[in-house]
Image (spheres, rainbow, N blue to C red):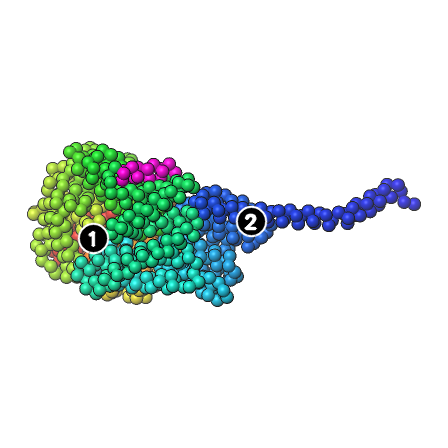
Amino acid sequence: MISFWRLFKYLLLCILGLSIAIGQPSLILAQEVSKQTQQHQAEVLNQRGQRQLDLGQAREALESWQQATKLFEHLKDREGITGTLINQNVALQALGLHLRACKIVVTALKFDVEICTNSSDQPTDSTKRLLDAEIDKLNPIPVHLLGLQNLGNVLRQLGKLSESELVLRKNLLIAQQLANFDNSAILLSLNNTEKSIYQQARDKYSWIEEPVFQKETVNFIQKQGLKLLNNYQLLIDIPTAPIPIKLQAQLQRLSLLLDFYKWLTAKSNLGNTHLAAIQTQINQQIKPSVELILKNASAFSKLPTSQSIYTKLNFANSLNQIPDERLHSVAVQYTKSALQTAKSINEQRLMSNAFGTLGKLEKEKERTLHYLEQAMALAQSIQAWDIAYEWQHELGLEYYKQGKYDKALEAYSAATDNVTKVHDNLLPSNADLQFSFQEKVEPVYREFMQLLLASPNPNLKRVIQINERLQIAQLENFLQCGKLDIIPLNEVKNLPSPPTVVHIIDLENSVEVIVQSPDGSFHHHSVDSKLVKASVDNLLEILQSSRLASINKNLIISPSQSFYDLLIVPIKAYLPPSGTLVFTLDTSFQSLPIGLLHDGKDYLIKRYSIAQTLGSRIRPPKFLPKKQLTALIAGLSKISPSFKALNAPEGLKALLRVKQEVEDVKKQTTSSTVLLNEKFTSQALEKQLSTNDFSILHLTTHAQFSSDAQRTMFFTWNKPITVLEFDNLLKLNAQTNEDGIELLVLSACQTAKGNKRSALGIAGVAAQAGARSTVATLWKVDADSTALLMEDFYKNLKFGTPKAEALRQAQLNLMSNSKYSHPYFWASFLLVGGWL
């Protein structure tokens, strides 16, 4: 007999089962309704984000797309998630947050490769292979093609042009295989990346000094410019291309025509007849290009609102470069139209850009000031420092023209402060400032220093601070490395005695020498730059000659003494009789061995140990502990496969005395690890630096310093290591070595012929390495004498002698040997960074 409780339980289960069976369709239906509602909400948010972005409301658009992504994630809608992540990337780009944008789109595409933060300017072969493999995994559907296009765009914004080109070319190949797919937007993105590659070469040309590299760059700029003009035209001529795409291609082509013409004009004026013919051809295309855009002016209204504003301002800036009154009036009209639209949507960044452009176009002085002040105020209100500094610079120039010197100083001071903020926070993600440093950034610092020094009682301390900022900004731009961890000398604590610092600053028409005495006083002397540069050019011509060892010493002493008389004699009274002198040299003088300067009786090195610093900024100097001379010693004594690399200088030969130098250095150290010839590979170097703690890194191998970071390198057995790659290696060392490398020695270096800024490369290696001090050579020196000098140098260090003094004593000892008394043997060695 079944008990009552068992019967009740049985009936309850039956009722529950029946109710579930009846209610299940309703539950499923409710879930489906909920899914449809969420799907609808996600699509509404997606569309709202697009409208917000079109109106220039990028932050609001980002929030809408973030909400949409969450809904798609809840729905497990993979395509919806990908699409909204790509949209988030677009909003982040509009906000200037390119690094975040890049990481978002990489997530959207599910790529398992690090391409957003890789610091090297050129992708490695392994990076290329990984990228190719990840792209090949994608389904060829429109959302993935859109993602790849946006990845290419953001990589361009980050200055990763090789990666951007690779992604966009691959994207184009996939798009061309799909039926009825409009690939004009991808073509526009690819052309824009090619234009950035052209612009990067243009910028490089302005500061590359070596004739052989200049010639290569000239050829590249010419070919790239002509090819790109043709590619933009092909895109414009596609019948099915959307009108907005055609308009953007026309505007990009016009700005390229104007820039290319400007560059060709400068080169033609130097006597290049071949380029003069191309210049004429380019000039003939400018006016027709403008008229075509004006003829299709209605196309501007077909763009999203914010894009239409930027496009009009870009067109106005292009028209402003053409000496034509009618076109100037048209430029003003387009700018005022852009301003009106920006006001209508109350978008402050766009309004700031429009007011700033009006300020540059306006010819009436007071209205110019009014527009620029409006632009600056708006930029500051939203903390847009990357455009605020530009308007402050323009204001400084305008105040100066109008004789308002106090206001000019104030504007320049604010501009340099904001440039520093941009460099500290935005440089690694701001390709525009990377590629136009010399044109857009450097003048702000130099003009400010000129203005400060024009005062009857110049603030010399402020001049030095601005020069420091310029030197650091130059190095950060050279290395594309972000903020460097180095501090001003006056902030260094616990120095046994502060050194005398000599600043030599090139301000176009004058060279300024400022002495910073240990007691904190400043002394200043100014000299006509033409006189100084004649001596510098003459001396460099001799020192960089392949025949230096056979040139009569008196021919070297003569220009060396001229330089000494012009720059050192006027400040001699403020220098100590002996001790350490720390020099901060502007780029024009960085390849000069200061110890070689001659007073008519003797060399400067006879009285002083000498160190060079970057704008008087260094890692805090400290003595190298006698009992902690632990070294990684690496070198090449044989011809290696790396000598055949594409970027290797010609004529590299075996360094026959390397084995001896390695043995000599090894004897003077407490403990050491040696990598010689075949054992000195890039992989072996990486392994040692990532797993061991060394106070000294001594490399006795070919090295070259250049004004081009890609040609600043040293050679391992299997490949040359550029300064940018060296940074990555030494970051590994920093993870295991808390103090970093105390001393980096680069033996057998040479400066590329014609280079005046060798110390930029040397300081770059030191700064990237986190080394307190770097010893290097300015030209390829004699192997036997170098081995002797290095043996002496390390003996001195072993006895506790400060690094700069240890090097000086080794140089003097070499000089005292009649066989090696010629400057060729001893003058090339210099110390950069901490002198203790």
Q: Nearer the viewer, residue 687 or 720?
A: 720
Q: Nearer the viewer, residue 346 or 138?
A: 346
- The disc label shown at residue 756, or none: 1
Residue 487, quarter of the rendered image: top left
Q: Residues within 10 Å of mark 1 (few under 14, many from 20)?
A: many
Q: Amino acid at mark 1?
A: Lys
- On the question of residue 640 being in view, the answer is no
At 30% from the left and 63% from the top, the residue drawn is 226
Residue 16, quarter of the rendered image: top right
Query: Is residue 373 magenta-colored?
Result: yes
Percent of width and height locating residue 1 = 92, 45
- On the question of residue 276 being in view, the answer is yes
Q: Amino acid at mark 2?
A: Glu
Per the picture, the main secondary structure of the magenta-coloured stretch is helix
Left or right? Give the position of 615 relative to 552. Answer: right
Residue 799, quarter of the rendered image: top left
Percent of width and height locating residue 532 = 13, 48
At 16% from the left and 33% from the top, the residue drawn is 457
In this rendering, the answer to whether 484 lies above or below 645 is above
Percent of width and height locating residue 646 = 31, 64
In this rendering, the answer to whether 638 lies above or below 800 is below
Q: Which region of the structure is painted magenta?
A: 367-382
Left or right? Give the position of 100 relative to 641. Answer: right
